[in-house]
Each structure stands twice: as structure tokens, then as C-alpha cells.
Image (spheres, grey):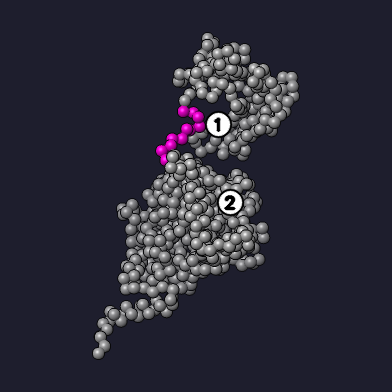
């Protein structure tokens, strides 16, 4: 005799059967797992006043704006929604409406007043995720793009400055992916990376079937306040971003897309900080349609300002799968109508003014055989400062392309190498790309030395400046002159293309006492007693001449005259009649093989003037305007 099946049981069996038909043998669910997913859907999908299904198959629920996911965040319980920014950055454009041929958002005015559209999450969406805790989040280790976390690859332009916003126009494509778990996107990043709690705000278009269930490009947003560890997500898949537009929701499909050597679909995005509320706004189009904002309270370092802004492409790929296309799927040197581009790039500076992107942006590409970025310069007009980026992909994570047939790797070997890289490459505060390779700026107490068991409690000697001071601010230098004191003002100073005021300094070691004397002109100012020193009690191993600056502000100050050394006499700072005392206690000319060092050549430089003899002898010019 068969056991009767209740109505509720029949419903459960039909649901499970539907899931198995959609996903086959990809994943089977226990009743407990099914109930867990169902509970998560109830959290994500808020009660709807109205539901709208788009021609692309997406369903948007019109939800009371004060019941949207943002208000699940404990910091936003009493938040009052801003319907628009209190002010805009100076120079923000307000011209044309959205391109009439661009279909983005909801028709017929979208949702009713007092509600906002939220893309409905389906059971199938949750089933594609590896874990519910990671649903809607980027799987990024050491999240900064300049670290190239495993599986992620980039072709981006970067500007390091104090930033309060940015603007970009980009063309939209539908790159081909090799696997649903891959994604390919074009976006802007607003970043503060000045602590180990990386904060980012991100917006652009993305193709990500593993998350969104289809391969159409979507308008997306993202954020994190802790280096992608546990905060932030795409769109409204967690509490954070506040949607205010009734007809352009995040998660909207963008159609049509650009065609190779044909019509180009563009979107314009602006992200900027409201100077009064501190919230970060997203607007779309040249007429600045307000989509929504990230409340200031979500962030730590970004609550103040950004230290870095980036624009470009990112892809993610998986082991043993060829990497997907980025952008149009073509390299950037193919140019307009064929490559993905970012144009009319601007940033909001610390005066809340939109400015052109300066020439000192740096480009970053970590897989050049697959993806590249090139600087198109500043053409003004409709293009302004612009970049092309992207590529065909095709890289296999098994390293076959990189290493040829020298060695084939099993999955276990690959994972072993990946683990070793994690040990060797410490979390970076900043990454620097040079023509000879990449350099990570790492917390000095997290460098590899401290992995040694004998150095666990080691204290770093900081720059050799644990002792000493300026002038007579501490015990040390012995003043002997009664009329020329260290700390004296030197006046008048040189004038640009006019009178040049010169001073002559000599420092030498007394061969009898071992003390180091300072002579200004022909006056003995004082000396550093030999007993102050360890290695300098004997002799020096290096002598240097030139300029140094120090700043705690955003922009570096001028050095020397404030002009680059190639401007020469009467315009640049110089040092002449350079000599040194050798080990026979004799003054000698500086040899011609003296190396030059400049660590910020866009701001400060040094050039060797050679040896002219006479009143000039061996001489150098140095300095620069700063401003970096």
C-alpha cells in the first residue's frame, strides 16, 4: 500500500524536479539545502508593489525605497534617503540626454513613486554559487588590481592623486566567455589604498553569466570597505548601495552593443562625492541621471577621499580554461570601431572641480599576450583624454602559453606553485610597474625577513636616523662661531634669470682629533665630535650632493629654484666646484664616473654639467617644480 503524499510534499517534489531539469547533474540539493536557499531568497527579494519583466527575461520588483537591501545594513537603519546630490562638482557637464538608440532601464517610467526597481534573484542564481556567503561577491585575494590576484587579469590606466570623483565615457561590447564562471568587464575604480583596509567604489558594464544567468552586458556597481574580504557586493545583492532611480536600476541590460567596424554603443558614468553629505553618487549620461549612491558610513578611508582612480578592463578565469575576451576581443592598437575605449576622462580634484587627466597616469597590464592598454592622448572635443584597451584572451591557466613545452603542470603542481607565490608575494599597499618588472610596496614588518624564526621579534633600524637632529635641537653638534650660527637665515636668495646668491660649504675630518668640521665661506662654524659616531669615527664610504624634499601633503613642493635643471644657469639650482678629501687628506676633483640618482623624475631631476675648470669646476644642476 503506497503512502499518501500531501499537497505540500507534491509542491516540494515538483520544485526539486524543476531544478534537476534545469541543471541536470550539476548539483543535487537536499531538502535542508533547498530550504536554506529559499530562506536566502526571502532576504534578497523584498515584497514587491509591482513587478516588471524585461524583454531580456529579467524581472525587476518595485520595492518600497525604504525596504530596499541597503536598509538591512546596521549602519543604515536610520538613514534618510537623498533623492539627489546637494551639489555637483564644478565643471560637471549637463548636456545631452541618454543616446536615443541606447536601451537601458525600464520602459513607461519604470516603478511607481516611492518605490525603486530591484532585479529579482532566482533559485537558479543561488545554485550557481559555491557558497551562499560568497554570493554576489568578487573572489579576490589581496584585492588591489596592481597585485593581480589569482585568476584576475587587468588592462587599466591609473592616476594617483587625492580624488573626489571621476567621469568616463566607454563603448559597450558583449565579449565571448569560455565558461559561465568567467566574467569580463569595463569599469572605473575609485580607490583608497592607504591602509590595509582597501576601500573601493566600482561601476561599469559586465558580462557574467555565472552570477546573472545570461551573457548580456549589464550596468553594475560594486564596493568593498575591507579589501574584498567580507564587505560589499555587486549591485543590490547585499546591504550597501542605495538605489534612487525609478527607471534605471543597477543590473539593467545594455542594448544594443557595439559592432566591430560598425555602430558604437556608449555609456557615460560619473561617480563623485557629495561635499555636504559625504556620500558617493553614481550618475549616468551627460545629463547626469541619478542612479543612486554609496553612503559615506559604509567606508573607512573612502569616507574622506580616494587616493587612486583607475579605468579599464578586468577578466576572471578559472583553472584549465582559456581566458575570455576583454572589451571588443581585439587588441587596442586596432583603434576606433574595433577596440574598446574610454574617452573624455576627467577626475574631481580636492577643490571639487572636474579636471583633465594629467600626463603622469601610468598604464598597467599583467598579461600582455592577451590584454593590453594604450594611451590615446588628449584630442579635446568629444574625445578628450582617452585610452584603448582589451584583447582576445585565450590564455590557459595551466601556463602552457607562458612556458611552452618546457614543463607541463598537473592541477596539484599548479596549486602548489600558487601557494608558494602567496608566501613569497606579501600583501601590497601599492604596486609599481617598471620596464623591468613589477614591484610591490609592502609593510616593512611583513617583508620576508620576518618569516625567519630568529627575526620574529626583530626591531627594524629605521634609516639610520634613530639618533641626531637638526642644528642644536639635541646634544651633538658643537657650535664655535660667535657670529654665524646654524639655523641662521640666508638672505638674499637667487632670482630667476637674475642675480645668483652663492654659499660655499666645506666639511672635513680633523686628522688629529677625528672630529668633523663645518666651514661656511672661510668661517669655522663648529664640528661634530668623533665620539658621536660608530662607522664615521673612521671615515665615510659615500658622499652625496643635491636636493631633497619631504611632504605630508598631497602635492610635493618645489626643489631648488622650482625649475628643471635643463634650464641651466640663472634658472636652475646648481652646485659647482665640487671636490672631495681622499684618504691622503687631500682635496681632489670629483671623478667623471659619479652616478646620478633621481627617484621622481616627473617632478625633480639632476644633470651632470661636467668639469669646466676655473670658477665652475665639476658641477651639477638639479631640482624641479614638484606638484606630483
The tag earlier along the polypeptide, 2 or 1, is: 2
- The one nearer the camera, 442 or 301, is 442
**Residue 119: percent from the left, percent from the top?**
42, 66
- Name the residue beneath numbered marker 1: 549
Residue at x-position 51% and y-position 16%: 529
- Please give the label number shown on residue 58: none
Give the quadrant of the C terminus.
top right
x, y percent for residue 625: 60, 34
Start-end of magenta stretch = 456-466
The residue at the far bottom in this view is 1
Within 10 Å of disc 1 (Cα), the crowding (few <14, some 14-19, many 20+) is: few
Q: Determine which of the numbered discs, if any, sits on residue 364 in the image.
A: 2
Q: Nearer the viewer, residue 361 or 601?
A: 601
- Taking 521 as reference, is 449 above or below it? below
Q: Is residue 22 above or below residue 81?
A: below
Local secondary structure at mark 1: loop
Determine the secondary structure under disc 2: strand
Majority secondary structure in the magenta region:
loop
Question: Do we see residue 302 in this rendering?
Answer: no
Q: From what the image shows, is residue 541 above or below residue 106?
A: above
Tell me the CA gap for discs 2 and 1. Answer: 28 Å
For the point 44% across and 39% down, which residue is it? 455
Q: Position of residue 289 (x, y in %)?
A: 48, 58
> Looking at the image, which residue is at 46% across and 54% down?
141
Q: Position of residue 226 (x, y in %)?
A: 41, 51
Q: Left or right of 235: which side holds 336?
A: right
Residue 510 located within the stretch drawn in magenta:
no
Amino acid at each position: 500500500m503506497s503512502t499518501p503524499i500531501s499537497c505540500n510534499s507534491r509542491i516540494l517534489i515538483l520544485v526539486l524536479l524543476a531544478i534537476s531539469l534545469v541543471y541536470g547533474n550539476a548539483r543535487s540539493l537536499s531538502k535542508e539545502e533547498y530550504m536554506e536557499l529559499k530562506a536566502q531568497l526571502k532576504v534578497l527579494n523584498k515584497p514587491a508593489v509591482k513587478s516588471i519583466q524585461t524583454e531580456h527575461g529579467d524581472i525587476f520588483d518595485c520595492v518600497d525605497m525604504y525596504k530596499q537591501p541597503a536598509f538591512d545594513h546596521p549602519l543604515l537603519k536610520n538613514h534618510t534617503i537623498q533623492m539627489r546630490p546637494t551639489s555637483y562638482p564644478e565643471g560637471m557637464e549637463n548636456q545631452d540626454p541618454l543616446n536615443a538608440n541606447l536601451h537601458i532601464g525600464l520602459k513607461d517610467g519604470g516603478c511607481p513613486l516611492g518605490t525603486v526597481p530591484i532585479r529579482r534573484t532566482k533559485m537558479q542564481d543561488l545554485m550557481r554559487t559555491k557558497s551562499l556567503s560568497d554570493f554576489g561577491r568578487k573572489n579576490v585575494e589581496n584585492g588591489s588590481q596592481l597585485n593581480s590576484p589569482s585568476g584576475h587579469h587587468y588592462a587599466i590606466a591609473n592616476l594617483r592623486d587625492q580624488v573626489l570623483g571621476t567621469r568616463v565615457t566607454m563603448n559597450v561590447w558583449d565579449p565571448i566567455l569560455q565558461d559561465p564562471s568567467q566574467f569580463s568587464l569595463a569599469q572605473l575604480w575609485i580607490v583608497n589604498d592607504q591602509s590595509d583596509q582597501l576601500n573601493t567604489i566600482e561601476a561599469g558594464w559586465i558580462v557574467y553569466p555565472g552570477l546573472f544567468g545570461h551573457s548580456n552586458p549589464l550596468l553594475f556597481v560594486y564596493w568593498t570597505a575591507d579589501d574584498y574580504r567580507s564587505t560589499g557586493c555587486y549591485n543590490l545583492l547585499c546591504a550597501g548601495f542605495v538605489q534612487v532611480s525609478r527607471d534605471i536600476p543597477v543590473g539593467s541590460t545594455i542594448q544594443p552593443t557595439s559592432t566591430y567596424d560598425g555602430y558604437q554603443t556608449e555609456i557615460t558614468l560619473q561617480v563623485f562625492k557629495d561635499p555636504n553629505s559625504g556620500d558617493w553618487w553614481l550618475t549616468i549620461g551627460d545629463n547626469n541621471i541619478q542612479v543612486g549612491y554609496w553612503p559615506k558610513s559604509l567606508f573607512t578611508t573612502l569616507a574622506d577621499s580616494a587616493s587612486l582612480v583607475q579605468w579599464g578592463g578586468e577578466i576572471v578565469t578559472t583553472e584549465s580554461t582559456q581566458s575570455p575576451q576583454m572589451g571588443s576581443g581585439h587588441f587596442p592598437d586596432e583603434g576606433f570601431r574595433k577596440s574598446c575605449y574610454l574617452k573624455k576622462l576627467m577626475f574631481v580634484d580636492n577643490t571639487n572641480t572636474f579636471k583633465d587627466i594629467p600626463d603622469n597616469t601610468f598604464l598597467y597590464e599583467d598579461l600582455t599576450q592577451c590584454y593590453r592598454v594604450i594611451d590615446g592622448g588628449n584630442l579635446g572635443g568629444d574625445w578628450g583624454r582617452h585610452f584603448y584597451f582589451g584583447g582576445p584572451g585565450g590564455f590557459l591557466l595551466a601556463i602552457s602559453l607562458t612556458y611552452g613545452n618546457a614543463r607541463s603542470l598537473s592541477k596539484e603542481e599548479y596549486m602548489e606553485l600558487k601557494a608558494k607565490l602567496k608566501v613569497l608575494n606579501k600583501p601590497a599597499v601599492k604596486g609599481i610597474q617598471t620596464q623591468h618588472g613589477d614591484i610591490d610596496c609592502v609593510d616593512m614588518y611583513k617583508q620576508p625577513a620576518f618569516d625567519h624564526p630568529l627575526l620574529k621579534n626583530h626591531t627594524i633600524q629605521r634609516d639610520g636616523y634613530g639618533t641626531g637632529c637638526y642644528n642644536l635641537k639635541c646634544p651633538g653638534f658643537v657650535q664655535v662661531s660667535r657670529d654665524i650660527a646654524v639655523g641662521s637665515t640666508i638672505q638674499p636668495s637667487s632670482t630667476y634669470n637674475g642675480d645668483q646668491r652663492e654659499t660655499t660649504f666645506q666639511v672635513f675630518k680633523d686628522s688629529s682629533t677625528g672630529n668633523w668640521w663645518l666651514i661656511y665661506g672661510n668661517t669655522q662654524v663648529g664640528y661634530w665630535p668623533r665620539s658621536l659616531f660608530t662607522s664615521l669615527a673612521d671615515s665615510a664610504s659615500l658622499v652625496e650632493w643635491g636636493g631633497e624634499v619631504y611632504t605630508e601633503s598631497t602635492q610635493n613642493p618645489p626643489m631648488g629654484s622650482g625649475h628643471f635643471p635643463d634650464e641651466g644657469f640663472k634658472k636652475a639650482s646648481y652646485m659647482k666646484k665640487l671636490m672631495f678629501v681622499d684618504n691622503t687628506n687631500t682635496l681632489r676633483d670629483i671623478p667623471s664616473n659619479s652616478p646620478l640618482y633621481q627617484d621622481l623624475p616627473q617632478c625633480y631631476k639632476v644633470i651632470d654639467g661636467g668639469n669646466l675648470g676655473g670658477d665652475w669646476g665639476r658641477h651639477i644642476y638639479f631640482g624641479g617644480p614638484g606638484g606630483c
